[in-house]
Image (cartoon, rainbow, N blue to C red):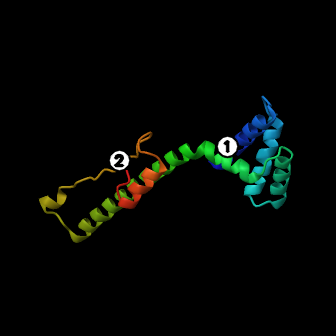
Amino acid sequence: MLHATLPRAMSSLIADGQDLVKVETEWVASVRKFLMGMLAGDEQAKQKLEQLLETFGLSLDVVTAATFEETIRSQVHTDRMVEAAYERRNAAYAELERRRARKANGATAPSDRDETIHEVDAPPIDGGKGPADHADRAASGKVT
């Protein structure tokens, strides 16, 4: 997520610093090319990207920090959704394992057939108090 929005953050920083209204689409395409090369481990692409940023008085660290600032909210929401999906998956696996164990033991009593399904709620979209609240709830075992 962070790397996908890096060119936009770069454009914003350059436009703010030099009062540019619009950054050329060709420039953004070359930044994306260098960025993809850098992510693939190409040291030459990283050097070219750093040289390009230096021409505008920026560094890769500054641009990464600005990008992180722009995307932190959606990253937190994505993290909560992934965590909720992970918990639902684990609950489904536990239920499946419990049913397999009952079937293997030959349990057929009416009380054994009385199944209780446990639901796990998805996290609130705009609820909570932010990452600190989420970390406190996770530490106490009350993550929703």
Q: Is residue 90 left or right of residue 66?
A: left
Residue positioned 80% across, 59% down in the render: 42
Residue positioned 75% across, 38% down in the render: 11
Residue identified by numbered label 2: 121
Label 2 Cα crowd, 10 Å radius (few <14 / some 14-19 / many 20+): few
Q: Relative to 102, does residue 72 appear above or below in the rendering?
A: above
| Residue nearer the viewer, 46 or 114 | 46
Q: Earlier in the sequence, mark 1 or mark 2?
A: 1
Residue 85 visible, this angle: no
Q: Secondary structure at mark 2?
A: loop
Report the residue that reaches farthest toward the bottom: 105
| Residue nearer the viewer, 26 or 94 | 26
Q: Position of residue 87 (x, y in %)?
A: 39, 56
| Residue nearer the viewer, 79 or 12 | 12
Q: Is residue 52 left or right of residue 69?
A: right
Q: Relative to 94, does residue 79 appear above or below in the rendering?
A: above
Q: State how far apart marks 1 and 2 are (Cα).
A: 30 Å
Q: Position of residue 71 (x, y in %)?
A: 60, 44
Q: Nearer the viewer, mark 1 or mark 2?
A: 1
Q: Position of residue 119 (x, y in %)?
A: 31, 50
Residue positioned 28% across, 53% down in the render: 118
Label 1 Cα crowd, 10 Å radius (few <14 / some 14-19 / many 20+): some
Q: Amino acid at mark 2?
A: Asp
Residue identified by numbered label 1: 5
Image-quadrant location for residue 114: bottom left
Q: Position of residue 15 (x, y in %)?
A: 77, 35
Report the residue that reaches farthest toward the left: 110
